[in-house]
Image: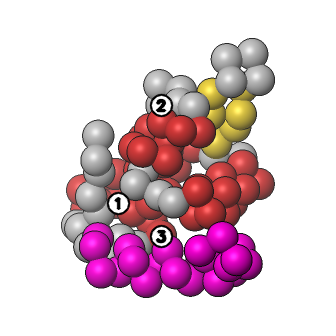
């Protein structure tokens, strides 16, 4: 596996995860990450709490930070959900109350 490029490694990880883990939507992953960020989490804790590989975590962290839903607090070395991220979570839960989306939350 050391000779694999990052892209090949990501493909391999995806194949393994398909065999070992139930499919989760992107929304499920985002929800898990934002919920974990409510209390502030390190990168390692976020990987564990959101059940992500290192490559997946990097992609989703970039996505959430670019959209202002999650931020890195350099004083604590933790990722924290932003006010916009909290609003997003609340709206998502409100929608789920009206029309169940079958979203899961690990927390």
Q: For numbered disc 1, what is the local secondary structure?
A: helix
Quarter of image, res 97: bottom left
Q: Position of residue 24 (x, y in %)?
A: 35, 71
Q: Residue at x 29, y 51 (%)?
A: 105
Along the line of sight, the residue nearer the viewer: 49 or 10 = 10
Q: Do the residues under discs 2 and 1 have CB atoms within 8 angstroms?
A: no
Residue behind mark 3: 26
Q: For numbered disc 3, what is the local secondary structure?
A: helix
Quarter of image, res 49: top left
Q: Residue at x 48, y 31 (%)?
A: 38
Residue behind mark 1: 95
Q: Which residues are magenta?
A: 1-21
Lateral position of residue 2 relative to residue 102, left or right: right
* Residue 38's disc number: 2
Q: Position of residue 33 (x, y in %)?
A: 48, 48
Few, some or many residues within 10 Å of mark 2 (<14, 14–19, 20+): some
Quarter of image, res 15: bottom left
Along the line of sight, the residue nearer the viewer: 91 or 27 = 27
Q: Position of residue 60 (x, y in %)?
A: 61, 59
Q: Earlier in the sequence, mark 1 or mark 3?
A: 3
* Residue 37 visible in the snapshot: no
């Amino acid at each position: 596996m050391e000779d694999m490029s990052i892209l090949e490694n990501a493909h391999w990880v995806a194949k393994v995860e398909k065999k070992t883990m139930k499919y989760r939507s992107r929304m499920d992953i985002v929800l898990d990450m934002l919920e974990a960020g409510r209390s502030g989490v390190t990168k390692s804790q976020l990987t564990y709490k959101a059940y992500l590989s290192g490559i997946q975590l990097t992609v989703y962290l970039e996505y959430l930070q670019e959209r202002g839903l999650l931020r890195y607090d350099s004083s604590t070395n933790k990722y924290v959900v932003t006010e916009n991220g909290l609003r997003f979570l609340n709206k998502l839960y409100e929608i789920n109350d009206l029309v169940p989306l079958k979203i899961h939350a690990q927390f």
